[in-house]
């Protein structure tokens, strides 16, 4: 993969933040290929390097990346632990977009664990925050879609349909 060439070049320049970003991108490539162990390996390399260089915003993103890996690979409890770490830092730095996104991810994980009331609460929280963030549409749509799924699962189709429409 060409990204390994980029990684090799960044290692020569010793640019730690670019090396961490390469590790992250490699992790996402492996996630897309459903090679979960390799994905986790590279996402953790990125996280550990960002911790080493104290890049707090990237650490938040790394924990969210891991949560998404664990959501995709059906390791839901591990995903919730990553979200807790990410949320703590995001609140510390008052990053509204990250806080809202993390709440949506927590809701997705709780939904998969059949914790429907916790998922509903998480979606409401995430939507409430993300609806106030300019140019935030993707995670807001995920929030509406997820909340619609919750309402559908609760047998409240009349409440679910408008949420599905907002998600499109």
Image: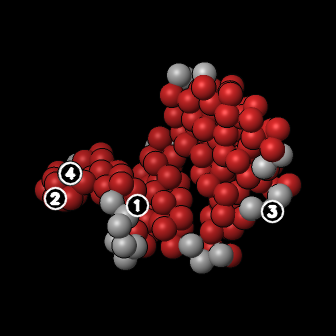
Residue 54 is marked as 3
Sequence-first tag of 1 and 4 = 1
Judge left or right: residue 167 versus residue 54.
Answer: left
Q: For label 2, count other residues whose C-alpha is less than 10 Å away and answer few (under 14), some (14-19) or many (20+).
A: few
Q: Which mark is first along the chain, 2 or 1? A: 1
- Could you say which quadrant of the image residue 40 lies in? top right
Mark 1 vs mark 4, foreground winner is: 4
Q: CA distance from mark 1 to mark 2?
A: 15 Å
Point 46% across, 48% down: residue: 108
Give the mark toward the camera: 4 or 3: 3
Residue behind mark 1: 123
Residue 85 disc label: none
Q: Residue 20 location in percent, x, y?
A: 73, 46
For label 2, the residue is 162
Q: CA distance from mark 4 to mark 2?
A: 10 Å
Which secondary structure, mark 2? helix
Disc on res. 168: 4
Disc 4 secondary structure class: loop
Q: How far across and how far down the image is residue 34, in percent? A: 54, 23
Residue drawn at 81 percent across, 62 percent down: 54
Q: CA distance from mark 1 to mark 3?
A: 30 Å
Q: Earlier in the sequence, mark 3 or mark 2?
A: 3
Asked which quadrant contains residue 19, the reply is top right
**Is residue 30 left or right of 139 when viewed as pictured?**
right
Q: Nearer the viewer, residue 121 or 134?
A: 134
Residue at 75% across, 40% down: 10
> Does dot 1 land on a helix, a strand or a loop?
helix
């Amino acid at each position: 993969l060409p990204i390994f060439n980029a990684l090799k070049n960044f290692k020569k320049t010793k640019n730690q933040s670019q090396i961490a970003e390469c590790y992250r991108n490699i992790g996402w490539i492996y996630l897309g290929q459903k090679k979960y162990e390799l994905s986790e390996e590279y996402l953790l390399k990125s996280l550990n390097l960002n911790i080493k260089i104290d890049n707090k915003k990237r650490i938040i993103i790394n924990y969210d990346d891991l949560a998404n890996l664990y959501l995709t690979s059906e390791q839901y409890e591990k995903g919730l632990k990553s979200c807790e770490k990410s949320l703590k830092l995001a609140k510390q730095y008052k990053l509204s977009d990250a806080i809202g996104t993390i709440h949506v991810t927590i809701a997705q994980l709780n939904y998969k664990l059949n914790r429907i009331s916790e998922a509903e609460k998480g979606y409401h929280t995430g939507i409430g925050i993300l609806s106030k963030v300019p140019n935030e549409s993707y995670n807001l749509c995920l929030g509406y879609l997820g909340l619609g799924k919750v309402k559908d699962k609760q047998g409240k189709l009349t409440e679910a349909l408008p949420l599905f429409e907002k998600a499109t």
